[in-house]
Amino acid sequence: MRASHTLFKMSTRTKTVCVIGAGPSGLVAAKTLTHDHPKGTFDVTIFEQSQRIGGLWPTTRDDDGLLNPDMCTNQSRHTVSFSDLAWSASSPAFPKAWQVGKYLEDYIKRYPGYSIKMGVKVVKVEPPYNWQTTSAMSGKWNVHAQHTESTESLQVYEFDQVIVATGFFGKPKIPDTLANFPAPVWHSSNLRDVNSALTDNGRLSSPKGKNIVVVGGQMSGVETAAAIALQVSSSVNSTESSISNAKEYKIYNVIQQPFWVMTLTLPNNPNIDGAKPEAEKITNPAPTFLPLDLVMYNLGWKPPGPIKNSSGHISPEMAKTTNGFLNNYLGADQSGIGTDHLAIAGDIRSEPPRLTVSDNYVEFVRAGDIKTIRGKVISADLNQSNSITVEENGNQQVINDVAAVILATGFDASPSLDFLPKEILQHLSFDESSSKLPLALNVHSTVNAKIPSLGFVGFYRSPYWGVMEMQARFLGKLWSGDVHAQKTLELDDSLDELLQLRTDPRLAQFPMGDYAYLMESFATAVGIKRQEPKDDPGARTGIVLPSRYIYSHASPSQKEQAALALSAISSTFDSSTRGTFVSKAIFRSLHGTWRLSRSLRSSLSTFPSGTFTGTAKFLPRFPTTPSFDSEYLYIEEGDFVTDTGMTFKASRRYVYRYREDTDTLSVWFVKTDDNLGVDYLFHEMEIIIPEVQDKMDGHGKIKGWRAKSSHLCIADTYDVEYEFRFKGVNVEEWRQEYSVKGPNKDYRIKNEYRR
C-alpha cells in the first residue's frame, strides 16, 4: 500500500517537538534534532514520567527498575552505543546495565540543548484538528501532561511534532492461569534475588515447595533461569549462603520450542580455511574469539548487489542457512546436553530460528541444574497443592511442590500508547494482540504516511541503538523539509506486507532483526555514506557499527567521538588475534562435570607413581573478591591406583577465577578448614600465541590453544602447561601437565579432561 499523502514544504520557523520518554530512544531523538540540524531548526522537550533518565536502563547499582543493574548487556559496547559517543577505554566489553545508564547520562552532558521534564507523565495527546487532511504537517498537537507526584491539574502544551519513544515494555504479561496461584508468582523484570521470590519479599517465613519454575523460553526466560541457577549454585558452593537449604531446590524452565543459546563471545574462525571442500569442514581447535555482535553483524555476509532484508518472512531455505550458520559457530546442534528439548536437528532446521544469549544456560542444563519441560502451562492447582500442569501435543506433565513461579512471558505494549486517541490508533492499525508488530508504520517502523507529524523511535521489538539513531535522523530530515526524505516516505509501500506478517506462521523472531539492511537502508534515506577503509573506499566490508554512519557535516566533537569508537573496534580486532577473549571462552566452557584421567610419574622412590580416574566438577559461584568477575569451585573425586597395585580414594579442591579487565584465568588453593574459602594463588595462566609453524603437534594434529605458568611454592617449582581444544564455542577436551621439582619432589603429572 503506497503512501498517498503529499507532503508540503516546511516553513523555516523553529519547529517544536515533544518527545515522550527519556530512555535511549528518546535521548537520541532529542540530541539528533538538536545537534544534527542548524541551530533553531527544532526546539525539543522530553517528557519523562519517572524521576530519572534511562528508561529500562538503571543509572545506579541499587536501581529498582525493569533491568537488574548487575545484568550485563547481550551485545558488546560497540553495538550498545550511538555514533557520536565512544565508551571509555576502560569499559568492559559487555557493560552492566547500570553502566549503560551512566553512558546515557554522559550523552546528555556532552550533547545538551533540549529540555527534560522529569516526573511528568503524558496523559493524552490530541492531534491537529486537520490531521486527516493533506495539510497534516501544519497543525499543532496538544499534549496533556501532569506531574506524577502532585495533584495539580493537567497542563496542556502545543507542539508541531510528537515522537513516541516509550518502548515496548508497557506492563508485564501475567497469564490468567496463574493469577491466584498459592506460591509466589513474579515477573522476571522484578526479580533481583531468589530468596525474595521464594519468600515473596518476606511475606512468607519459609517457602512451601522446592521447585522453582521459570515460564518462558526466549531471551528473558533463558537469562532468568540461568541467573536463578547461578544464585542457587553459589549458595550451595560458597562459605555464605543467601538461600536456606539451597541444595534442595530444583529449577524447571517451561519452553514451547527449541532455541539456540549463543554465548557472549563467538569464534571468529571456527573452521580451518581451505583445508577441505565446504562439505568437509575441519574444526579449528584454536579459533580466535570476538564479542558475538562483531561476528554476526558483518556486511561481508551479505551477497553482492543491493542489500536485501533477511528478516520478516523466513523461508525454509533461509532458515536452513541461518540454522546451519549458528550450528557451525556454536559447534553443535545442542543435542548432546542431556535433553532433546533444545536440539536444533531434523525438521526443526527448516523452521525460523529462535535466538537467545547466555554464557551459562546450556552448561546448567547439561549439569542437570536446569531441567527443561516442553509445552505450555494450561492449569494450576489453586488449592494449596502448589502444582502446575504443562501440556504439549496432548501430553501433560505436572510439576508439584512449586516454591515460586517466575514469568518470563514478555510485556504488553498497550500502556506505552495509552495517551494516543482511539482514532489515531485505528489509523495506525494498532493490534494489541500482536507482540511483534502492534503498529503499522512506514520506513522501518518510524512514521505512518497518514500522520507524518507523529514519529516513532525505538518502538519495535529489540531495537538496535544504531537504528534508533537512524530513525531520529530520518524524522529530522522529514520534518525539516528534506525532499529526499519526503520522497522516501511517499514511495514506501511496506504496510500491506507488514500487516500480512502479523499472521505469518513463519514470521521472524525479530521482524526488524536485519541490522545491516536497516542501517544501509536508512543511510540511503538520510544521505549518509558509510565509512570504509581509506585503502579501499569502494569496499563493502566490516562490521555494522553506529560510528561508521555519521553525517559529513557532523561537528568536530561528533567526528572525534566516532573516530575514537572506530579506533576501539580496530584495537578489539587486533587484540583478538593475540588471544584476547580466549581466557574468557575457556573459563566459560569449563562449567560442569568432566571425566578426568591422571598419570603421575615420580623420579623418587619415596613418592609413589600411579594413575587416577574420576570426575572433575567446576561449580559456578559468585566471586568471593570484587576484583574478579567469575569464579568456580573445583572438586575432583576418584580412585588413585599406585604402580604397586594399592588403591585409595582421592580428592582435591581449587578455585578457578576469571578477571575481565586483565583477561586472565587463575587457579587458587582452597582453605582447608572449610574446603570452600579461597586461600592463596597457585598460578595464573599465560595464553601462548601460536606461531604459524607451531600449529601442528608431533602427530600431525592441529594444536588447540595453549597456556603456561610457573609457580614457586616455598622450595618447590611448579611448571604448568595447558592445551584447550575447541569445537565452536566449547572446549571439547583439554589437558594439563605439571612438572614439579624441589628438594624432596621430582615428578610429572598429566591430566586429561573429556566430557
Image (cartoon, rainbow, N blue to C red):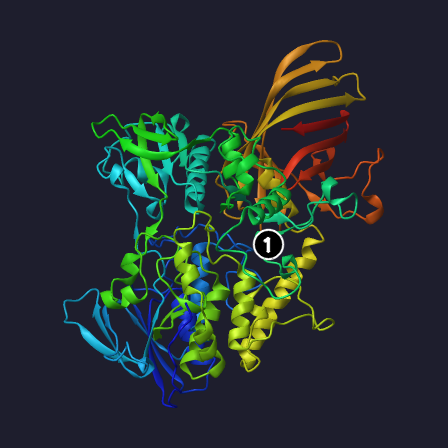
Question: Where residue 155 sits in the image (x, y, percent)?
Answer: 19, 75
- Circle 1 SS class: helix
User: Up-down: is 206 above or below 357?
Assistant: above
Amino acid type indicated by mark 1: Met
Q: Toward the viewer: 10 or 695?
A: 10
The quarter of the picture where the N terminus appears is bottom left
Left or right relative to 434: residue 736: right
- The foreground one among 700 and 216 is 216
For mark 1, what is the residue? Answer: 296
Q: Position of residue 469 (x, y in %)?
A: 47, 69
Residue drawn at x 69%, y 72% is 538
**Nearest the camera: 753 or 718?**
753
Describe residue 684's horizontal placement relative to residue 74 as left or right.
right
- Front residue of this view, candidates 632 and 229: 229
Rendered location of residue 370, percent (x, y):
45, 32
The answer to which image quadrant residue 56 occupies is bottom left
In the displayed structure, does residue 345 sit left or right of residue 646? left
Q: Residues within 10 Å of mark 1 (few under 14, many from 20)?
A: many
Q: How many marks?
A: 1
Reply above or below: 130 against 728: below
Looking at the image, residue 562 lies above or below residue 316: below
Residue 230 placement (x, y as % from top left): 46, 38
The answer, for residue 85, to whether it is visible in the render is: no
Residue extending furthest top?
645
Q: Quadrant of the C terminus?
A: top right
| Residue ID at (67%, 58%) | 573
Residue 231 visible to the viewer = yes
